[in-house]
Image (tube, helix red, strand yellow):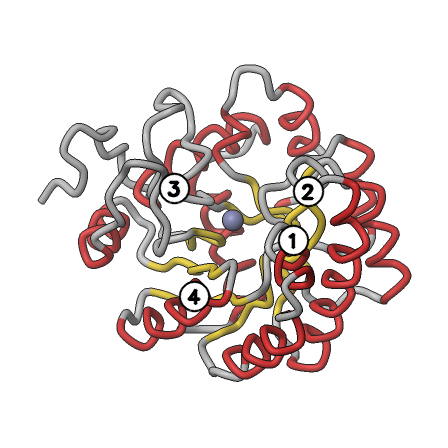
Amino acid sequence: MSVHAGRPPAPEALPIPVVDNHTHLDMARDGEEAPDIPAVIEAATAVGVPRMVQIGCDLPGARLTVEMIDRYAALLGGVALHPNEAPRLHDRGELAQARAEIEQLAAHPRVRVIGETGLDYFRTATEGVAAQQDSFRWHIDLAKRTGKVLQIHDRDAHEDILRILAEEGAPPQTVLHCFSGDIAMARECVERGYFLSFAGTVTFKNAAGLRNALAVTPLANLLVETDAPYLTPAPHRGAPNAPYLIPLTVRAMAAVLSTDVPSLCTALAANSELLYGPW
Ligand SMILES: [Zn+2]
């Protein structure tokens, strides 16, 4: 069945199945309907994306994420307070309680990710920075205490992300979701053993710097994601995104890396299993 009337057509299926490392099946863009999750999973599976990591960004999203992973075997979960959410909770005096609940939800065996956390200097004005940094440090500690993978949101905050990770000591498994750095940052992350997760942004015309960063990243450090419903890959930029569009991003990545699609898929699948284990 077609999932999205009027949405981009399904791309050619990948030869080897990969994992969508970061998606928001609980979210819809303004004015759009919430995704029909079984249909989303079916469409993704049909093109070689049978598994995805569902990320809940605030308390309602984290609660929904746990419900979703209980219901759908294709999903693993991630829970956290997004860097734009933490300052709001802090200002309302609700932070301690929210943290306690995130910690409780994170105990679920199929919540394998603490994230997305990190820093967003694009959206949150100066007064939110201290609360963001404090929240980021707390999530780093939570990932270490629970032995789960840390997924980081980094918007216009590269230096502080790297500095705080170094200060706190990064968890053994650390992922920069929707990687947006340059060559130097990619090299620094690889040297530290972090994983770089590339989204549809790598297909954008104006993203030459990002493609240069991808080109110097070894296969062993790579992941792929949609960050759906946002960041739809070319040539469908602007349309709603969903996990079934990942093959467009994977093929673009293979071209940048001068590697064949099956080799890239094999590496992406192995890296995901290494981080999250089987499911
Ligand atoms: Zn996200």
Q: Amino acid at mark 2?
A: Thr
| Secondary structure type for disc 2 | loop
Q: Amino acid at mark 3?
A: Pro
Q: Earlier in the sequence, mark 3 or mark 4?
A: 4
From the top left corner, tell me how far across and down residue 40 is, in percent: 24, 51
Query: Where is mark 3, residue-wise?
Result: 229
In front: label 3 or label 4: 4
Query: Where is mark 4, residue-wise?
Result: 60
Around disc 3, counting alpha carbons within 10 Å, would you say few (fewer than 14), some (14 to 19), or many (20 or more)? many
Around disc 4, counting alpha carbons within 10 Å, would you say few (fewer than 14), some (14 to 19), or many (20 or more)? few
Q: Is mark 4 within 8 Å of ligand 1?
A: no
| Secondary structure type for disc 4 | helix
Around disc 1, counting alpha carbons within 10 Å, would you say few (fewer than 14), some (14 to 19), or many (20 or more)? many
Residue visible at 78% across and 46% down in the picture: 127
Query: Where is mark 2, residue-wise?
Result: 124
Query: Where is 98 relative to 223, above or below?
Result: below
In front: label 2 or label 3: 2
Q: Earlier in the sequence, mark 1 or mark 3?
A: 1
Residue visible at 68% across and 39% down in the picture: 155
Q: CA distance from mark 3 to mark 4?
A: 17 Å
Q: Amino acid at mark 1?
A: Pro
Residue 83 has which mark? Answer: 1
From the top left corner, tell me how far across and down residue 107 is, in percent: 53, 84
Q: CA distance from mark 2 to mark 1?
A: 8 Å
From the top left corner, tell me how far across and down residue 234 is, in percent: 41, 23
Residue visible at 73% across and 39% down in the picture: 125
Q: CA distance from mark 1 to mark 3?
A: 18 Å
Q: CA distance from mark 2 to mark 3?
A: 21 Å
Cβ atoms under marks 2 and 1 closer than 8 Å: yes
| Secondary structure type for disc 1 | loop
